[in-house]
Amino acid sequence: MAQVKVTLTRSLIGRPEDQRATVKERATVKALGLKKTNSQVVKEVTPQIQGMLHKVRHLVKVEEV
């Protein structure tokens, strides 16, 4: 499978709860493994990951590895 490097480029302040990090089941950014601005993770591309990236596409930068 392909891999992507995801970088959190924008702040989570003022964002809706389902994009932020307080509730585990609904926290898209936390589920991706991102914590602070400019933090990076490498993820396998799956339909679930693609959906999460689409939901927070305005907050992250995605690069193919």
Image: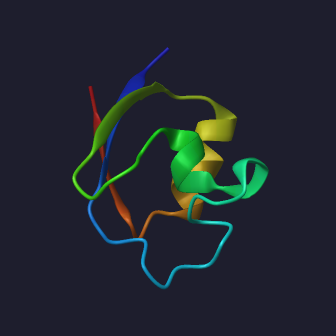
Outermost residue, front side? 22
User: Which residue extends farthest left?
Assistant: 38
In the rendered view, tell whether residue 50 sits above or below residue 41: below
Residue located 62% across and 78% down the image: 16
The residue nearer to you, when weighing 58 against 13, is 13
Outermost residue, right side: 25
Query: Picture coordinates of residue 7 (x, y %)?
Result: 29, 48
* Quadrant hosting residue 63: top left
Q: How is the image coloured?
A: rainbow
- Residue drawn at x 43%, y 20% is 2
- Find residue 41 and report its horizontal and vertical position in percent: 35, 33
**How many marks overall?**
0
Residue 47, how many percent across, how many down?
67, 36
- Nearer to the camera, 15 or 43: 15
Q: Is residue 6 left or right of residue 33?
A: left
Which quadrant holds the C terminus?
top left
Image vertical order of residue 27 relative to residue 10, above or below: above
Residue, x 28% and y 39% (percent of image)?
40
Q: Judge whether 24 appears above or below 44 on screen.
A: below
Instruction: Determine the image quadrant of residue 13.
Output: bottom left
Q: Residue at x 40, y 23 (%)?
A: 3
Asked if residue 5 lies left or right of residue 2, the reply is left
* Location of residue 61 (image quadrant): bottom left
The x, y position of residue 54, in whole percent, is 55, 58
Q: In the displayed structure, would residue 6 be above or below residue 57?
A: above
Query: In the current view of this chain or complex, which residue is farthest to the bottom?
Result: 14
